[in-house]
Image: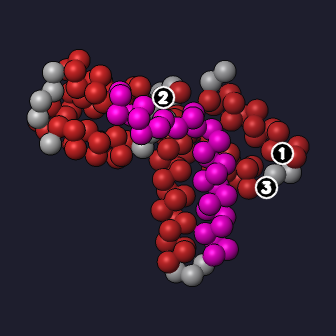
Amino acid sequence: MSIKATLTEELKAAMKARATIRLATIRALQTAIKEAEISAQKELEDPQVLDLIQKQLKQRQDSEALYEQNDRPDLALRERQEAEELQSFLPQAMSQDEIDAVIEAAIAETGASSIKDMGKVIALIKPQVAGRADNAAVAQAIKQRLG
């Protein structure tokens, strides 16, 4: 079942259970997906939807940090709860050892030897870690390995 179909089923379940935060989070996510589809003028596939979920998750985490800094624990709690709901739609996160193994395999396959070859390595790794690892953390690990 596609992620969008799963979201629709989860929306129905949240409505029946009267889970307000989950319901609001799923609706916001579906709206973001629809906007992205209109912008791209095509239907999004699962990898693109995963990227969008990760982007929404990052926004919630950034907002939570800002609310904490500005002494608004009520709003920070709401953002944290929404982030937890979004996290439930992402696949199991990769461990650092798994990420390192994927990076090593990609470097060996591409023959990368310097930071100039980072683009080749990222292009090979991106489909393998989509939705399972933070792209910034992966890029940093590649830089350390090649630098």
Which residue does the image show at 35% across and 27% down from the upper left? 102
Tell me, for residue 20, which label it has, or none. Answer: 3
Cα distance between the residues tagged 1 and 2: 27 Å
Q: Secondary structure at mark 3?
A: helix
Amino acid found under the numbered disc labelled 1? Met
Amino acid found under the numbered disc labelled 2? Pro
Residue beneath disc 2: 47
Quick check: is 81 in the magenta stretch? yes
Q: Earlier in the sequence, mark 1 or mark 2?
A: 1
Q: Is residue 143 above or below residue 109?
A: below
Question: In the image as oriented, which residue stretches furthest toward the top?
Answer: 109
Which of the two residues, 61 or 2, is positioned nearer the viewer here?
A: 61
Residue 84 percent across, percent down from the top left: 64, 51
**Residue 40 showing in the rendered view:** no
Which residue does the image show at 41% across and 25% down from the upper left? 128
| Left or right, residue 15 beside residue 138 | right
Cα distance between the residues tagged 2 and 3: 27 Å
| Left or right, residue 100 beside residue 22 | left
Question: In the image as oriented, which residue stretches furthest toward the front?
Answer: 97
Region rendered in magenta = 73-102
Q: Residues within 10 Å of mark 2 (few under 14, many from 20)?
A: few
Q: Earlier in the sequence, mark 1 or mark 3?
A: 1
Which of the two residues, 124 or 106, is positioned nearer the viewer here?
A: 106
Quick check: is 134 in the magenta stretch? no
Q: Secondary structure at mark 2?
A: helix
Residue 113 percent across, percent down from the top left: 12, 30
**Residue 58 showing in the rendered view:** yes
Tell me, for residue 42, which label it has, or none. Answer: none
Residue beneath disc 1: 15
Amino acid found under the numbered disc labelled 3? Thr
